[in-house]
Image: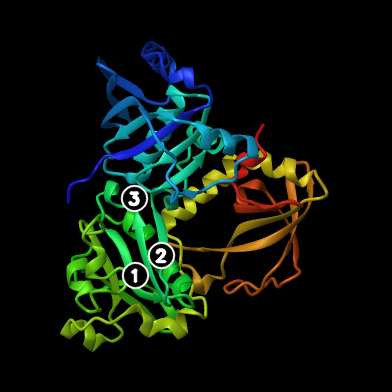
Amino acid sequence: MSKPKSQMMAVPSQPRDIETPQLFLDRLQTTGSFQVLSKRMEEDTLYLEINYKGEHYSAEIYPSSFILPELYRCQHLFPDVDAEAVRAAQFGLAVELEFGKNPLISYHLQLKLIYALLPDVLAVLDDSSEKILSGHWVTLAAQSMIPPSPRYLFTAQAVSGEDDCVWLHTHGLNRCGLPELEVLNSNKETYQTHYNTLETLANRLLEDESVPEYGEPYFLAYVAQNIPLVITLIAWEDAVSCYPEDMLGGKNDREDGHNEDTCAIFVYPTKKSVEEGQYSSLAVYDEMLQDNPIYMLSTSETKRMKALAAERMEFLFQAFSDKRNHVLIKLGLLVDEPYRTDTSDREHIWFEMIDLKDGRITAKLTQEPYYIAGIHEGYVGTYGPEDITDWLIFTPERRLTPDDIYLLAP
């Protein structure tokens, strides 16, 4: 499938910042984040050819009026004064980018481009995923060497009607060269577990080199011991034919949208169903899905999270110095010999941070390990920052991760 351009609208802190095209050209001269191969102005549009991490990108930038969409998800917390300014804004800077081979790297470049053009950006409307991003978060993400979480590439929306029916669907995957994903005929009791399945599949497909063919079995997880969750993608036209036309998300809802490059998630509950091509609704796993199946993170995502946690470690140490805060760290510890494989030899488990001295961290284990026999819940050990793969800060007001530490940034 062809990829539409990723569309974002950058809202400036100062509206006059988007009135002078020469200002953008001057700022592009000083950026070291990417290489501008060529640039040209045609009327009010700036066309750029960019080299980033060895790949060629094309971008279009132009000022535009806009009205804040009511249904966009506010991804981040905004101070009241910022939220009011975003609602009052009428003009922004549209930044369109055609994604390259790696969607996450492409997304990161788009944030870096926005930051280079508007270093004091107030907010960013990610039109492709229907998200509203904090300007403070965009600044921190653009300055980082580590891309943001893959979940920023898309939004999974849950639409409910007057009855119990819930229709789950994504926005943002098309720009990555993927079909949008849906779960049809969910309900208000089970949609959250279906949402988790949809989000996990989206993250997995973003890392895969190819998209499974419609009807092809795809292993996603184990919903219980030795019970695999094997999903399949079905074209929306075929999917809606399984349900009444007037159902929420059914055929009658497709006239004005959600009728291109989108598919629904179904499952193969048995080996025989795979062989016969007889797929079923995700609802056949509802009872087991409610038992919180473990969706394993990929190796690349674990590495990305560890790199981001390391890059922002100073925020963790600063937060720990405030005794009002409660800090948890996730440590990657070597598992016992029988459980080591060629691809994994670490168990990532949560500890409570209780002391920091001379760069060494003393922490107490908060859970029972699965694959390490020598330690148990309550065990206290001393570790180096290099052992940390993730962390959480609980302040009196909120819970913070390396991703949303922008709330503590100056």
Disc 2 to disc 3, how far (Cα)?
17 Å
Question: What amino acid is found at the position of numbered circle 2 in the picture?
Answer: Val
For label 3, the SS is loop
Q: Disc 3 marks which amino acid?
A: Gly
Q: Is residue 334 above or below residue 175?
A: below
**Which residue carries the number 1 mark?**
183
> Label 3 neighbourhood size at 10 Å, few (<14), some (14-19), many (20+)?
many
Mark with earlier residue (2, 1): 2
| Quadrant assignment, res 275 | bottom left
Along the polypeptide, which appears first: circle 1 or circle 3? Answer: 3
Q: Is residue 268 left or right of residue 372?
A: left
Residue where numbered disc 2 is placed: 159
Q: In the rendering, which numbered label is found on residue 62?
A: none
Residue 398 image point, x, y percent: 69, 52
Spatial CA distance of label 2 from label 1 is 11 Å
Quadrant location of residue 349? bottom right
Rendered-image quadrant of the C terminus: top right
Q: How many marks?
A: 3
Q: Nearer the viewer, residue 59 or 296?
A: 59
Q: Residue at x 38, y 40 (%)?
A: 107
Q: Is residue 96 above or below residue 179?
A: above
Q: Residues within 10 Å of mark 1 (few under 14, many from 20)?
A: many
**Is disc 2 in contact with disc 1, using a CB cutoff of under 8 Å?**
no
Does the CB distance between marks 2 and 3 fall below 8 Å?
no
